[in-house]
Image (tube, rainbow, N blue to C red):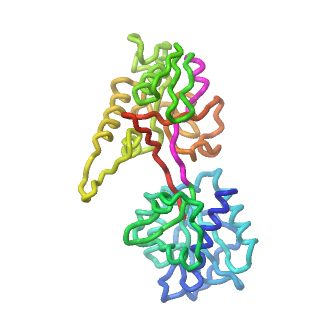
Amino acid sequence: MKSLKMLLVSFTLIVVALVNAACGNSPTTPSSQPTSAPAEPTVAAAPTSAPAATQATTGDRIKVRWFVGLGAGTDEGAIPPQNAFVERFNASQDKIELVLEIVDNNVAFDTLATQIAAGNAPCIVGPVGIRGRDSFKGAWLDLQPLIDKYNYDLSDFDPNLVKFYQVKEEGQLGIPFAIFPSFIIYNKDLFDEAGLPYPPARHGEPWIDENGVAREWNIETLTELAKKLTVDVNGNDATSPDFDPTKIVQFGWMNQWTDPRGIGTFFGAGSLVDENGNAQIPEHWKAAWKWTYDGWWKDWFIPNGPYGGADFLQGPGGPFSSGNLAMIHIHMWYVAPWALGNVDFDWNLAATPSYNGTITAKMHADTF
């Protein structure tokens, strides 16, 4: 319910700007073409042509198009709540008709680019993360004048999160909506089968090993644990001299659904651009990539490309939901039923380990 409230706030701030300007046209050229969009929320796999201009009215209502597809929102389980929100919003007032356009992510970027190029951009786009936002630089409304004009209270938000959505030379492009920190999710059944204690639930707590010894919960401890949870077809784990890396049937670890930046950030915050605008690779990111490479091809506790495509690691929510992967690092949105899937094993959450004494839990941040 809180997320729906924040969605309504985001829409309210943006919709105010639509009274004097059409979404899909320049502010000085409002559309005179009626729209044929249906009153009920619509779902589109990939529109073959841009919809009619948005500013046209149905009776006394202004049509406001909400484009979903650059980030989350296109998953099957996320569509009914979005449709329900549209129905709720449209029933709450008689000035605006919210029209939902859901476009498959694999064509959403091209679809939106086509709409913008045709002067027929939607009014609201989201949920959208940094990649989606920065793929259309200059296309977004600066909300700061509206925040100031209506004295909108941002005190509920951490100031750093508000600042996170400020873009140089573009303004306040969003307000905090969906903030997803990262964590470890682990398969309790695989730990129980191996006779290993679960990883700690709180940052800074030690891992108590199978001998009752407290171990600092860091990358070294995680690596050792992941090896013990990587098993071949004969039941040997990756710490055994009899372990056969060509016949692995269970893996101990994976940074699931991320890219090299995400893997690097597991070892600490960083950037590929330094303060002077020059390209760089942080040293701890190099260490994270080396650690991952060794996990793929030397220590064998992370599924590499060939193993990642193996049948035994295919699940509705990626390799972890297959039941044959003991631990992953991922963001909070993953625990939604439509993401993780209906798995047949018990699971729980654990803290991110430290690297050189520092704990870094990377974040996903979506807005509208």
7 or 40, nearer to the observer: 7
Say which quadrant the C terminus sits in: bottom right
Front residue of this view, candidates 278 and 302: 278
**Bounds of the magenta segment:** 179-194
Please say if 186 is above or below 337: above
Percent from the top left, x then y, of residue 181? 52, 46
Q: Is residue 238 within the magenta segment?
A: no
Of all residues, the one furthest to the top in this rendering is: 242
The quadrant of the picture occupied by the N terminus is bottom right
The residue at the point 48 percent across, 36 percent down is: 352
| Marker count (numbered) | 0
Would residue 325 be visible to someone looking at this image? Answer: no
The reply to whether residue 68 is in sight is yes
Residue 262, percent from left and from top: 41, 44
Whole-percent x, y for residue 349 in the image: 58, 35
Picture quadrant of residue 46: bottom right
Q: Position of residue 69 (x, y in %)?
A: 53, 60
* Residue in view at x 73 percent, y 79 percent: 94
Q: Is residue 191 magenta?
A: yes
> Against 83, is 141 above or below?
below
Q: Residue furthest right?
A: 91
Q: Residue at x 46, y 16 (%)?
A: 237
Please give the name of the residue rendered at 60% of the width and 42% of the height, measured from the top-left corner.
335
